Image (spheres, rainbow, N blue to C red):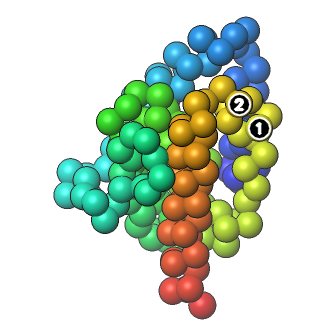
Amino acid sequence: MTIQDIQNDIIDEFSMFDNWEERYQYMIDLGKTLPLIDEQYKTDDHLIKGCQSKVWVHANMENNKVVFTADSDAIITKGVIAILIRVFSNQKPSEIIEANTDFIDEIGLKEHLSPNRANGLVSMIKQLKMYAIAYQTQLN
C-alpha cells in the first residue's frame, strides 16, 4: 500500500466517528496495536526531542524499506505515534521523505491536541523523516 492509500484509509476511519471523544478512544486503541520498540532502544538516543511525553522510536532498514517501532509513556501520544508509524513504516525512504502529512489536518488531529502535543506531533514527523533521510543517503 502506498503512503497516500494508508492516509486515505485513516481519513475514512476517523470520519466514521461523530465526535472527538470517540476519535481519542480510537487513537488509544490504535496505540495498543503499535509495533512495540525493543526495550534496548528505550534510551535517550531514541527519544523524540520536543515531545511533552516520552516517545521512543527505532528504525531499521529491511528490503530497502524503513521499518519503525515505537512506544510512549502516554496513551494519547502512543496513539499519535501509532498513526504515524502505520503511515510511514514499510515504505521506501524516498517515499517517506516526499510524503505530505495533510491527512493530519483532514482528520482534525492537530487542532484537537494541546499546543505541546501538537508541537510533539511535528517533532515525531520530523524524526521519522530524519531516519528516512539517513537511510536514503546509505542507498545512494
User: Which residue type carries mark 1?
Assistant: Asp
Which residue is the extreme one toward the left?
Answer: 40
Pinpoint residue 85: horizontal percent, then vertical percent.
52, 48
Mark 2: amino acid: Glu
Check contact, mark 1 vs mark 2: CB within 8 A. yes
Rendered location of residue 137, percent (x, y):
56, 85
The image position of residue 100, as x and y in percent, is 76, 55
How far from the left and from the top, in percent, is residue 115? 60, 36
Q: Which residue lies at the image location 45% right of the left edge and 70% below the top edge?
A: 61
Up the image or down, 79 lies above or below 23; here it is below
Q: Which residue does the image show at 73% across and 9% down from the upper left?
A: 18
Residue linked to disc 2: 111
Disc 2: CA contacts within 10 A as few (<14), some (14-19) or many (>=20): few
Q: Secondary structure at mark 2?
A: helix
Give me the C-alpha separation between circle 1 and circle 2.
8 Å
Q: Earlier in the sequence, mark 1 or mark 2?
A: 1
Residue behind mark 1: 105
Quadrant housing residue 23: top right
Which residue appears at 28% of the width and 60% of the height?
Answer: 44
